Image (spheres, grey):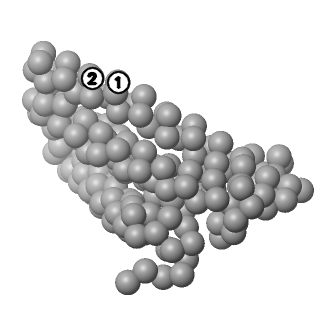
Amino acid sequence: MQTAQDKAHGGAFCAAVRKLATLWALFGGVVLLLVVGINMVSVIGTLFGMSFPGDFELTEMGVAVAAFAFLPFCQVSGANVTADIFTAGASPRWVARFTFLGALVAFVFGVILIWRMFHGLMDQRAYDYTTAILAVPIWYAFVPVLASLALLCLAALCTLIEEGRAARGGDAHV
């Protein structure tokens, strides 16, 4: 069932994108917790003379996946970096225009990154690049990163819709 806010701000599509971005960010949080766990085991193991082979490889891949997983949520929740000095005295309409511009940049940025990261994935896969110690194929990390970027584009599209309405004089996004 749609809430009044969903109807006012992009409808069911944007509500679904918000929900998916939230769940995807939680997935990123779980990945980050796993990375912390791996590092804890590695450090504690070192105290007892035991090593955790490949811990830094898993850390690199896990942190990259987690960081990209947070991007769509940052977009839909308005938690991206902003320059409040420019908007502190601005009207809600001008703030919406600035947010619209930021969403447009995020969308273009996401599309370019999807394009380049997809080619990176294909290269990593074609040349069979793996991590040095665990021999994990590097392209595995590209798959959730590409999913994150696709979701970022959808989130930016929703922000464009919402802030476009507000910039034209509709209700400002709250």
Disc 1 residue crowd, few under 14, some 14–19, many 20+, Cα 10 Å? few
Q: Nearer the viewer, residue 2 or 61?
A: 2
Picture quarter containing residue 30? bottom left
x 48%, y 50%: residue: 157
Picture quarter containing residue 115? top left
* Image marks 2 and 1: residues in contact by CB distance under 8 Å: yes
x 74%, y 61%: residue: 169
Q: How far across and down, in percent of the image, does residue 74 sit?
A: 51, 55
Q: How far across and down, in percent of the image, does residue 146 sit?
A: 30, 39
- Seen in the picture, residue 32 relative to 10 is either above or below; the reply is above
Q: Nearer the viewer, residue 83 or 163?
A: 163
Question: Quarter of the image containing the C terminus?
Answer: bottom right
Residue denoted by label 1: 116
x 46%, y 58%: residue: 73
Q: How far across and down, in percent of the image, does residue 132 sit?
A: 16, 24
Disc 2 residue crowd, few under 14, some 14–19, many 20+, Cα 10 Å? some
Q: Secondary structure at mark 2?
A: helix
Left or right of 153 on screen, residue 52:
left
Residue farthest along the right direction in this orientation:
89
Residue denoted by label 2: 120
Name the amino acid, label 2: Gly
Q: CA distance from mark 2 to mark 1?
A: 6 Å
Whether residue 66 appears in this view of the structure is: yes
Left or right of 160 on screen, residue 48:
left
